[in-house]
Image (tube, rainbow, N blue to C red):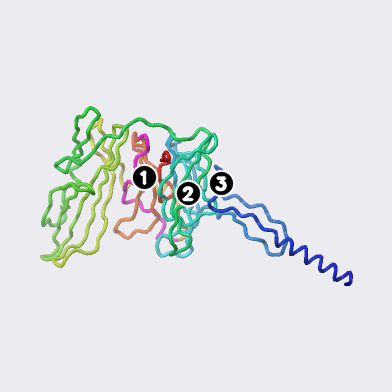
Amino acid sequence: MSDRWKAVCLVVGLLLGACGVPTAEKSPAQRPAAVTSTEGSSASPLPALTRTPLPTLTPAPLAFRLQPLPGGFQTGDHWLAVRVVREFAKERTAYTADTYAIWFTDGQRWLGPVPEMGLYITWLERAFWRPAGDGWELCAQVMVQPTLGAREAPMVFCTSAPPEAGPKDHAPVPPEASPCPDGRSLCVRRSDGTVQALPLPEDLFRPDPSRKVEEISPPEAGEEGVRMEIRYGTTEKEGIVETRIWKPACGARGRWVVVDFAVYQHPWAEDGAAGGGVERSELYIADLSAGTVRPLGTVEAREQLVNTFRAEGRIPFVQGDERFSMPNHFLAYVEGGCSPDGSFLLFGTGADESGMLGFPLSWVARLEDRTIYPLPGDQARWVEKSP
């Protein structure tokens, strides 16, 4: 064989050897180290073994920056897990997202993402602490759908917690709360055995004055809470049935009880009911010390916060599509419940029947002063002790 052909074979052999070296890839199930940066890290350039660059596992950057909550708002020893959008779908007729990741926060620090690449996480089931060496890990148990239509699978992702962070013991026992027999008041049993009755606002039971009332059923307690129905007539044979439901959701520090209130409507006709859905939903806080039951906030206050956070790039916003320009902030409902010590509340907001499209949000509230802030995700859970 000539020297020329020997040289060609040598070059081909070197190239084949280089292409045969396996590239180490990181499985999404592996736990990344805790990071505080909110930017996607850039990958180091690969050696130019061929003219075509090899793909990397560099995560796509977030469409917005994860930032500390204003005013130094923090949840103390209590950490949150939040499902955050990594990428929006390219074509939308309704809200969709390609991939998600879980981030952990105490209001000021953001740790994550887990997994680094982002997956189609259909549900954030729970978050918990797990021992790791001399410290702790922040973990999230989620349901993951590998591809559209595939069966969901449970997965757990973790990241290292700061040295001082970990589960804490909290002694306060939430008050025992239940509807009073009249269905219009909240009865709270105190530690000494006495019962305190707090009337709910009368507006929650008053019919719509602009409609013709055909029938009102008295409030009746059941498994789902206190239920009351109001039938409004529109014609002789048709009308609207309005179902109002309220229930105590969680108690906090022996001082507060969170009450979940919702209104459902559906058309009524002699041949039965069809269609309809939730019309109104709001959270009320029963203050046992003051003896009052008041709304946690107002729609207007939430709207102002949403607009401010959107302008600052703190919450997801799809640029260039006005249908998605405003996250839903109308219907408030209990999502993650009260924090382990009862000082904070996690709640969510979703769409109403007006047809507004947008990004549903999770919110965190400090019950002491009723300060609320939206979080940059649509699902959130308190990090709790592992069972």
Q: How many labels does the image show?
A: 3
The tag earlier along the polypeptide, 2 or 1, is 2
Kindly indicate the quadrant of the structure image that contains residue 54: bottom right
- Residue visible at 13% across and 65% down? 235
What kind of residue is marked 1?
A: Gly
Find disc 1 in the rendering and name its residue.
336
Name the residue nearer the viewer: 201 or 162. 162
Q: In which quarter of the image is the N terminus?
A: bottom right
Residue pushed farthest top?
Answer: 192
Mark 2 or 3: in front is 2
Position in image of residue 81 (x %, y %): 44, 45
Split into 4 quadrants, where in the image is the C terminus? top left
In the foreground, 3 or 275: 3
- Which stretch is magenta? 321-341
Q: How far apart are marks 1 and 3 (CA)?
A: 25 Å
> Circle 3 — which element?
loop
Between residue 294 and residue 270, name the one nearer to us: 270
Chain-order first, disc 2 or disc 3: 3
Task: Please say if the residues under marks 1 and 3 sit with CB atoms less than 8 Å apart.
Answer: no
* Distance (Cα) linking label 2 and label 1: 18 Å
Which is more N-terminal, label 3 or label 1?
Answer: 3
Residue occupying the far right of the picture = 2
Q: Name the residue under label 3.
A: 32
Q: Which of marks 2 and 1 is in front?
A: 2
Q: Residue at x 41, y 51 (%)?
A: 378
Judging by the rendered image, the residue that carries numbered circle 2 is 156
Task: Based on the picture, tell me whether residue 333 belongs to the magenta stretch.
Answer: yes
The amino acid type of the residue labelled 2 equals Val
Horizontal arrangement in the rendering, residue 145 relative to residue 303 (left or right)? right
Question: Label 2: how many residues lie within 10 Å, few (<14), some (14-19) or many (20+)?
Answer: some
